[in-house]
């Protein structure tokens, strides 16, 4: 019996390199039931490497899947105020980078922080949301996982995306073209620009909904998280079935930064200076083209998720 169980656990920690199921209702798929799968996943924590105080490295029970520049770091930091959250510090890129995925689930668990049994482990890799192979891989690891997705106005996200790459080049003292050079091609909006594609939330969300029911994906309104973070974080606490522990007093507006910062046990801290940068000024006509381009996909996205957002 023990040998059988060990075999099952070993099987469970091997990543399945090919998607185990095509499109369709995940709940009709064969395989271990959610409770058995949960038990197997629980057992894949690295008990051998466990701390004497009972902490161990667990596979994440929730993942912030994106979107890049949506406010993923702010969400992770804010959620980490909760004592029952153990967050991986850096982006793991397990499901989207082949060399990482090939290392298997044991390796993935080893990238996680040590946590206690009552805690939820969370990692964030914003690139997951827009990588088409990732939903199946996450599903193969844990079909009942709770996913967090933070979105913001798609046009604003494009400018934020550009700004990030611009600064990356500046830091390496490499020149980088003006934003218009990416946004316009032959006098038209350049819809091949990757940053525009990443803002097509409808397109990417469809991939996730082939594997996960909508109830398992909580969408955080990134624009609201900027303006007033506490109500958004309260919703996340509820989604993750965490006791309400984060308070409005954990947030204060920092006028110099122009964003909310965190207050935890009397310690104040803002996000890194790379978060909350000024975006380039764009010709209003071009900006309007961008808004128009996103109008239809946004509408479809609202229908898909049964919710509207205050986007241009
Ligand atoms: P900008 O720097 O373009 O303003 P991500 O962490 O996914 O890369 O997202 C970065 C974005 O988080 C920032 O984009 C910023 O607008 C947003 N953000 C949300 N809340 C923030 C906060 N409290 N402090 C700083 N940035 C925040």
Image (cartoon, rainbow, N blue to C red):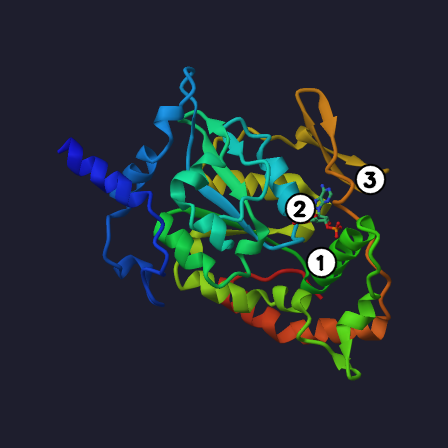
Say whether disc 3 or disc 2 marks the residue closer to the N-terminus: 2
**Residue 8 in which image quadrant:** top left
- Mark 3 or 2: the one toward you: 3
Q: Is residue 82 left or right of residue 51?
A: right
Q: Is residue 262 above or below residue 101?
A: above
Between tags 1 and 3, which lies in front? 1
> Mark 1–mark 3 contact, CB under 8 Å?
no
Asked whether the viewer can see residue 143, the reply is no
Q: Quadrant of the N terminus?
A: top left
Q: Which residue is mark 2?
A: 225
Look at the picture and state if 252 lies above or below 177: above
Is disc 1 placed on a helix, strand or loop? Answer: helix
**What x and y, as percent, mark residue 123?**
52, 41
Q: CA distance from mark 1 to mark 3?
A: 19 Å
Is residue 13 visible in the rendered structure shown here? yes
| Circle 1 residue | 161
Residue position for label 3? 257
**Front-most of 172 and 18?**
172
Earlier residue among tags 2 and 1? 1
Q: In the depicted view, which residue is nearer to us: 4 or 312?
A: 4
Residue 235, position as x, y percentages in the image: 54, 43
The answer to whether the beta carbon of the residue marked 2 is less than 8 Å from any atom of ligand 1 is yes
Label 2, label 1: how far apart the Cα atoms are: 18 Å
Q: Which residue is located at x 45 percent, y 61 percent? A: 133
Instruction: Give the residue displayed 53% in from the left and 65% down from the top.
Output: 204
Q: Nearer the viewer, residue 166 or 26?
A: 166
Q: Is mark 3 within 8 Å of ligand 1?
A: yes
Label 3 element class: loop
Residue 109 placement (x, y as % from top left) = 43, 37
- Is disc 2 surrounded by few (<14), some (14 to 19) or many (20+) residues within 10 Å? many
Spot the residue most to the left. 1
């Amino acid at each position: 019996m023990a040998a059988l169980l060990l075999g099952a656990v070993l099987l469970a920690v091997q990543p399945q390199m090919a998607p185990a199921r095509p499109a369709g209702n995940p709940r009709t798929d064969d395989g271990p039931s959610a409770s058995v799968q949960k038990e197997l996943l629980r057992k894949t924590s690295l008990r051998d490497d466990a701390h004497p105080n009972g902490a161990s490295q667990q596979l994440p029970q929730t993942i912030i899947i994106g979107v890049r520049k949506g406010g993923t770091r702010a969400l992770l930091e804010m959620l980490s105020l909760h004592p029952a959250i153990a967050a991986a510090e850096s982006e793991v890129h397990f499901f989207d980078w082949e060399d990482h995925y090939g290392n298997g689930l044991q390796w993935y668990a080893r990238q996680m922080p040590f946590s206690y049994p009552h805690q939820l482990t969370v990692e964030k890799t914003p690139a997951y949301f827009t990588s088409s192979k990732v939903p199946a891989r996450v599903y193969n690891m844990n079909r009942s996982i709770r996913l967090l997705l933070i979105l913001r106005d798609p046009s604003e996200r494009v400018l934020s995306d550009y700004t990030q790459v611009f600064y990356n080049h500046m830091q390496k003292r490499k020149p980088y073209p003006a934003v218009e050079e990416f946004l316009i091609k032959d006098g038209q909006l350049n819809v091949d620009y990757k940053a525009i594609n990443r803002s097509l939330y409808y397109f990417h969300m469809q991939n996730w909904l082939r594997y996960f029911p909508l109830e398992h994906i909580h969408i955080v309104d990134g624009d609201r998280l900027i303006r007033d973070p506490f109500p958004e974080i309260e919703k996340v606490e509820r989604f993750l079935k965490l006791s309400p522990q984060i308070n409005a007093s954990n947030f204060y507006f920092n006028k110099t930064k122009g964003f909310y910062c965190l207050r935890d046990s009397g310690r104040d801290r803002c996000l890194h200076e790379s978060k909350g940068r000024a975006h380039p000024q764009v010709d209003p006509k071009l900006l309007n083209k961008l808004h128009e381009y996103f109008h239809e996909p946004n509408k479809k996205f609202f229908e898909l998720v049964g919710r509207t957002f205050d986007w241009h």
